[in-house]
Image (cartoon, helix red, strand yellow):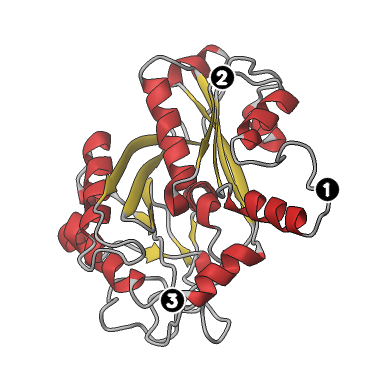
Amino acid sequence: AEAALAMAGLSEAPRAPVLVGTQGDHTVLSRWWRATVADEAPGPALPGLAAELPHQLAEDLGLGRPRLAFQNACVASADAMITGCRLIHSGKADVVVCGGAYVVDQEFFAKFDSGRACARDGRVRPFDRARSGLLLGDGAGVVVLESARHAAARGATPLVSITGWGLAADAYHVVRPHPEGEGLARAISMALRRAGLAPEAIGYVNAHGTGTPANDPAETAALRRALGAHATTVPISSTKGSTGHMLEASGVVELIITLLALREGTLPPTVGLVEPDPRCDLDYIPGAARTANPRRALTVNAGFGGLNSALVVEVADGE
């Protein structure tokens, strides 16, 4: 958060809301319960509950309110950013600090493993024929959102603009995605409509791409459904083969990766993709990174319970 504020040139933002996607309170509660059962001191008043993270960030950095924690699985930090965009567009805030954080813990790992969601061979292979599951990864990221008017008034140049966003739920299954990607396709279409763009305007897609047997073909179907014929030509990649699945932090970290791809003119590859699944037959950038200079990109995330998000980002004017 300190680095993001420094990069934004904001030494002070006393009125800025703080919105953070973070893992659920189950982690802290389970540790507290184990300590209680073992007759050990659990510490004062359950420190570390999810709601405490945005509050502590705001207190440490002199930021404002509201201070909200988002716990809606793998779209949590994307939802935080979308909420930040809404606060700015409604005139309720000029600057919003948004982020996400996830640290792998044994309880949550055990849940994924018992549900057979983890890769059996310890390798993440998004969209590959041999994929067998995901791997969890620690991660954290923070971005500073600012209205164009406020940035111009202080002479700041944005890195990118978020021009469209969408959230949708299909409630198909507790842990399995809709096989046709209905909710994700709807979120993508909402984001494009908000941005006033046709699918052909998108030059890169950062996919959710978990490497699980169910997610990847469903996501492929969603991209085809939302982007039409353009889905077969636009470069797409999942970066989870490099980072692991950061759950609640995925949205913001992958938006930062997408931002860097646009600014550096280098599209990241799908690490682990060697032999594409015939059901995942789009251009998922296997092998090496690709040089390209798209102006606009789409980043998508999906979570258990049928949660789906999409964000459209664009190189800022003057870049």
In this view of the protein, can residue 166 be seen by the observer? yes
CA separation, marks 3 and 1?
A: 51 Å
Few, some or many C-alpha atoms within 10 Å of disc 3 (few <14, some 14-19, many ≥20)? many
Q: Callout 2, which amino acid?
A: Arg
Residue 286's disc number: 3
Residue at x 52% of width, y 51% of height: 248
**What SS does tag 2 mark?**
loop
CA separation, marks 1 and 2?
A: 33 Å
Q: Callout 3, which amino acid?
A: Pro
Q: Residue furthest right?
A: 40
**Residue behind mark 2:** 65
**What SS does tag 1 mark?**
loop
- Confirm or deny contact between disc 1 and disc 2 (CB under 8 A): no
Few, some or many C-alpha atoms within 10 Å of disc 2 (few <14, some 14-19, many ≥20)? some
Q: Position of residue 264 (x, y in %)?
A: 54, 51
Q: Quadrant of residue 225?
A: bottom left
Q: Position of residue 150 (x, y in %)?
A: 50, 15
